[in-house]
Image: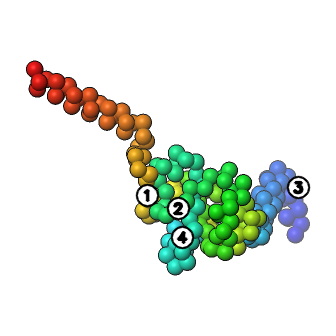
Amino acid sequence: MERIFEFIGNHTILTGIFGVVLLAWIIYEVSRMTRQWKEVDSLGAVRLINREDALILDVSNSADYAKGHIHGALHMPPSKIEAGNQQLLKDKDRPVLLYCKNGQVSPQMATRLTKLGFTNVNLLIGGLAQWIADQQPVTRHKGAAKSGGKDNKEKKDKKKARAERQKAGEDN
């Protein structure tokens, strides 16, 4: 026991850093255990969708939603949840699967949904990025290209101009 106190006395900075990290880890674990929503991986999300007919909410921005989302997901940006969307409030007792692009925004929205009275809120760990990495299917909005709409539009314009030039060359 004396050696522990000797170590602490000789390595105060190291011991202090260890204490801070340990305290942060304990606070994180306590907050994780007391929150009212659950985290699920991609497999758990598939089970939730197929077996419990979960309401799927994508809280990403409009551009990210258009690039890709889980089939059947409703686009519900944070502003709509904050406002207490009446259509959403009708499904309080239904299981909810919530996600965003990378899992950064969805934890705050999960907490907000539980405060609005939702009883079964589930958060997709890693967001849509993890869903795609796990090779799960995504749906894209009509007209949204995989690489982005602007590049795709430029390609279409070039093809159209080339076709018009060829047509004009045939007419001469």
Q: Earlier in the sequence, mark 3 or mark 2?
A: 3
Q: Mark 3 points at which residue?
A: 9
Q: Which of marks 1 and 3 is nearer the N terminus?
A: 3
Q: Mark 2 points at which residue?
A: 73
Quadrant containing the C terminus is top left
What is the C-alpha distance between the residues marked 2 and 1? Answer: 9 Å
Q: Quick one: SS at disc 3?
A: helix
Q: Mark 4 points at which residue?
A: 45
Q: Quick one: SS at disc 2?
A: loop
Q: Which of marks 3 and 2 is in front?
A: 2
Q: Which amino acid does label 3 sit on?
A: Gly
Q: How many residues crowd around disc 2 within 10 Å: few (fewer than 14), some, or many (20 or more)?
A: some
Q: Which amino acid does label 4 sit on?
A: Ala
Seen in the image, is 157 located left or right of residue 118?
Answer: left
Q: Residue at x 77, y 70 (%)?
A: 34
Q: Which residue is drawn at 42% across and 36% down?
A: 150
* Mark 4–mark 3 CB contact (< 8 Å): no
Looking at the image, which is closer to me, 171 or 6? Answer: 171
What is the C-alpha distance between the residues marked 3 and 2? Answer: 57 Å
Q: Quick one: SS at disc 4?
A: helix
Numbered tag placed on residue 139 in the rendering? 1
Location of residue 48 by image quarter = bottom right
Location of residue 124 by image quarter = bottom right
Looking at the image, which is closer to me, 40 or 17? Answer: 40
Q: Earlier in the sequence, mark 4 or mark 2?
A: 4
* Image x and y of residue 129, in percent: 51, 55
Q: What residue type is labelled 2?
A: Ala
* Mark 2–mark 1 CB contact (< 8 Å): yes
Relative to 126, is 121 above or below? below
